[in-house]
Image (cartoon, coloured by chain):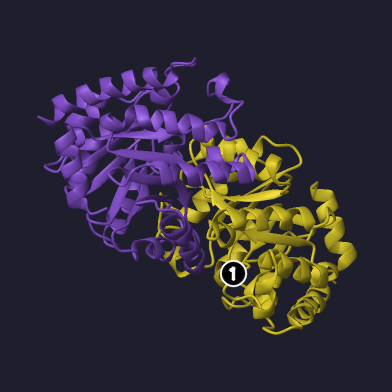
Chain colours: A yellow, B purple
Amino acid sequence: MHRKRLTEAIKEKGSYLCVGLDSDITKIPAHLLSQSDPVFAFNKAIIDATLEHCVSYKINTAFYESRGIKGWESLEKTVNYIPSTHFKIADAKRGDIGNTSSQYAKAFFEVLSFDAVTVAPYMGADSVQPFLEYSNKWTIVLGLTSNKGAADFELQEAGGEKLYEKVLRTVSAWGDPGNLMFVVGATQAEEFVNIRRLLPEHFFLVPGVGFQGGSLKEISEKAMNKDCGILVNVSRAIIFAGEGENFAEEAKAIAAQYHEEMREYLK
Amino acid sequence: MHRKRLTEAIKEKGSYLCVGLDSDITKIPAHLLSQSDPVFAFNKAIIDATLEHCVSYKINTAFYESRGIKGWESLEKTVNYIPSTHFKIADAKRGDIGNTSSQYAKAFFEVLSFDAVTVAPYMGADSVQPFLEYSNKWTIVLGLTSNKGAADFELQEAGGEKLYEKVLRTVSAWGDPGNLMFVVGATQAEEFVNIRRLLPEHFFLVPGVGFQGGSLKEISEKAMNKDCGILVNVSRAIIFAGEGENFAEEAKAIAAQYHEEMREYLK
């Protein structure tokens, strides 16, 4: 998906919501477990219910891999079910030496029809570049993550700046704002002004709103640019809003609340 | 697998060779392509041929994911085929926030019967700890990798030391030499003396010998400790040694050469 189409979708819809399909089979409503593919049945209902409120879906590969081949089947069906109007992110946090990263890029961009994949920066340029070689696809590199462990390395000093700043600065030269985004956690609001100053043009994928406690208002105020410039992901707070037969309507209601709030911030 | 069993296997066999099953379907012998699962047929023949010369197998998940569900099936069959005498490594380079890393740990340690999984350190403690919580399993964290991109961040200055040194020092406190190893590339021979001084007890998984050009002799001299302390991985130079009907014998011949050389260094 081209950047122009993504920004138009955000403006037309008045939403920069990404719904995270962290579809843990132990947390989905019990009545779905009798289905042949309970996780796909769950995802399908969540997608149908939230489609009008979001512009993107993010599939967290861990929750599928933990079910082996059956999980990979649910993942494939899910990505095929999401319409091409919506930006499809594989939250996979991959990254390896060049010939291996090429295989991961093939897995997510060719075998599966994702628009974007999240990539870890630790191993440097040749671990990221194979993803960037695909035209009309996006590489979303970890910048400053939402978890407590961000303090262990990302926020540590590294040659006169913080490590995450070095990562943003270095990696941004390997691609451009049309094929490269960064993960910046919503729980890192105090760093967001600095991050937007460092990278005025790029989109950020922002997890950490909802269950992890980040404030949508605060990060919207601090991180938006003229093209919106952020995709805010909410996973558990939306998909597990309800536990019973009407789980999809409850998920829809929460997604609608985020949508309404985002429409205000976009004005 | 307990450390004691691994070190005994190394001493009894006179080998610290890990065979890397980077089984790219576009590179396996053409006569296998008519089989129902060509990659598993290839792996099975390679495993049968090399079993006596190595103590470990490393499965690079990228080469399986790039074939979708069929690839995941080949991966599952392969890990089940490797006998429990051999140390089974998932070279997956995973790592995410805690609840997600738990799912990856489940994928590789419960659903699949790997002894070890490689993990990226960038996201810090809570991204690594879920792997360390499994008893009798190993977490192999990226330290200093074998690729050119290691220069971009790993070898950069970070608070008075190199970033990879900070990673080795910090992460080593999260586990112990009985459940934690580090990836150190064989192409980084000049850093090996320093690395062994920093971590005298730990095992290192050492890729980069063979196709990538690292010297087995040099890293063996610089990195061994009293328990051997290194697992040297060779992938392409062994598994793609031959291209025809006798590919397995050719792979065996190369594995035997490494074995013979290692037996000398272990004396």
Secondary structure state at the residue bearing disc 1: loop
Q: Quadrant of residue A79?
A: bottom right
Chain letter for mark 1 = A
Q: Residue at x 16, y 44 (%)?
A: B8
Q: Residue at x 52, y 50 (%)?
A: A120
Question: Which amino acid is tagged 1?
Answer: Asp
* B76 in relation to B245, above or below: below
Left of B110 or right of it: where is B217?
left
Q: On the picture, is A38 further left or further right than A65?
A: right
Q: Is the C terminus of chain A in the top left, top right, bottom left or bottom right quadrant?
A: bottom right
Q: Tell me residue B99's x, y (percent).
A: 50, 69
| Identity of the residue drawn at 67% across and 68% down | A38
Task: State the image quarter where residue A129 is shown.
Answer: top right
In the rendered image, residue B34, in percent from the top left (x then y), is placed at: 61, 26
Percent across and percent down for residue B79 are 43, 45
Name the foreground residue: B231 vs B109: B109
Image quadrant of residue B133? bottom left
Q: Is residue B162 visible?
A: no
Q: Position of residue B29 (x, y in %)?
A: 53, 20
B11 vs A203: above or below: above
| Residue identified by numbered label 1 | A24
Q: Is residue B13 left or right of residue B102?
A: left
